[in-house]
Image: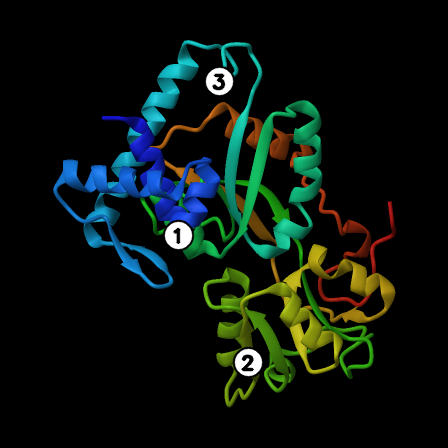
Amino acid sequence: MDTRLLHTFLTLARTGNFTAAATELHLAQSTVTVHIRTLEREWGTRLFDRLPTGTLLTESGRRRLEGAQEVLDAVARLRTGGAGAGEGGDGVVRGRVRVGTPESLCATRLPPVIAALRTRHPEVDVDLYAAGTGECVEGLRSGRLDLALLLEDEAELPFPDVAAETVAREELALVCASGHPLAGGEHAPSWARLARETFFLLEEGCSYSDALERRLLAVPDARPRLTRFGGVDAARSCVTAGLGLTLLPLTSVEEQVRQGRLARVPAPDFRDVPVRLARHRRRWTSPAAEALVEEMTRQWADGETPGAALSAPRGSGGRRPSK
């Protein structure tokens, strides 16, 4: 089988659009159409439903997606095995790595990693896709993603085909506007007090937001007002406007805290959330992806968070001294 057809199949599945797939593959749109029709004829099944808004994988197409990716992984593994450290026979690491990650890590943790990677391996490109755990896992399974970063506790993931290891930890910060009644307190408010507040949290599936919601609703006669958002910016903006509180990684709010627009609320008990590097157990990890993993490990090995200077001891309103 012509592996170009499989590349086209996977690209169209990822982009959901013939024009976008053709642009990414540097092909004419008619060529993409021919490739897909050829596969459908060879496999004797329809792979995509053609819709006015784009394409949608059929059930038959979804069943073949992982197998197509495994074939391309095997081909790439064979080529690399005979070519040394790089993928072109010259020892140079090159390629594109697609990473799914929570929005907060896109803006804080990953930019310095990618900058350092570009210096060490200038021919490695990284594409970042902001996504929650469920979307990241689906991306790993379908081949749309090579790696994913998950903000999840260290319990075994309920996805047997996905392996995850902790590579860093994010300190969480409960914050409100500087003029909020809870701003500047010396002692952590009780859960009963917090359960009377308004909260702007990230969407369902965010492990620490879900945990906070469970704690609030477990308070007898709790009446918290909870609004869930798909992104950090929306939740942070509502809180900055004085509408309530939010719980976010400290790195996502450190600038606003430093500017005095937000204030940290002494938290009753919020543990640091692990940053877990996830990949599909049966898929090959390319040299480019391994180079990115090595750079993450190198930069995050000491466990220091970018916002350490603004960290407050648990249960107090103080700050640690800047280093």
The first of marks 3 and 1 along the sequence is 1
Colouring scheme, one of rainbow, by chain, secondary structure, one colour:
rainbow
Q: Is residue 82 above or below residue 244?
A: above
- As drawn, the label of residue 226 is 2
What residue sits right under mark 1 in the picture?
17
The earlier-in-sequence mark between 1 and 2 is 1
Residue pictured at 63% horizontal, 67% vertical: 247
236 left or right of 229 in image:
right
- Answer left or right for 88 relative to 242: left
Asked which secondary structure carries label 2, the reply is strand
Give the quarter of the image for residue 251.
bottom right
Image location of residue 231, percent across then percent down: 58, 65
Q: Residue at x 56, y 54 (%)?
A: 102
Residue located at (48% from left, 18% from top): 87
What separation in Å lies between label 3 and label 1 (alpha carbons)? 29 Å
Q: Which of 70/314 is in front?
A: 70
The answer to whether residue 302 shows anywhere in this view is no
Q: Which residue is mark 3?
A: 87
